[in-house]
Image (cartoon, rainbow, N blue to C red):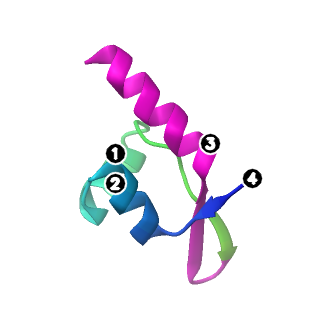
Amino acid sequence: MKLLRIKQVIEITTLSRSTIYRLIAKGEFPKGKNLSSRTVVWDELDIMNWINSADQDG
């Protein structure tokens, strides 16, 4: 399992930070996992699955 920081998620998805967090709030994007009080990471597989499902929907 590869863990991604927000900058990597932004690069992969081409979404802005605010768009990512807006989609998370709407339940439309994978939630990150807290490693500490100031560090959030995403599982790369979750992000890739989200991208693939978005490609199939669009």
Query: SS of the residue at dot 3?
Result: helix
Q: Which residue is mark 2?
A: 20
Tell which residue pokes out farthest to the right in this image. Answer: 1
* Quadrant location, the C terminus: top left
Horizontal and vertical percent for residue 13?
34, 49
Identify which amino acid the numbered label 2 is placed on: Ile
Q: Main secondary structure of the magenta part?
A: helix
What number is the disc on residue 51?
none
Q: From mark 4 to mark 1, how far is it between C-alphas?
A: 23 Å
Horizontal and vertical percent for residue 43?
63, 52
Q: Magenta segment: does it hold 28? A: no
Which residue is found at the position 27% from the left and 53% from the top? 14
What number is the disc on residue 1?
4
Depth check, mark 1 against mark 3: the one in front is 3
Q: Which residue is mark 3?
A: 45
Q: From mark 1 to mark 2, how far is it between C-alphas?
A: 5 Å
Q: From mark 1 to mark 3, how far is it between C-alphas?
A: 18 Å
Q: Which residue is mark 1?
A: 23
Identify which amino acid the numbered label 3 is placed on: Leu
- Say if 3 sits above or below 58 in the image: below
Do the numbered discs 1 and 2 sit on residues whose CB atoms are within 8 Å? yes
Along the polypeptide, which appears first: circle 2 or circle 3?
Answer: 2
Which stretch did the figure color magenta? 36-58
- Say if 41 sits above or below 52 in the image: below
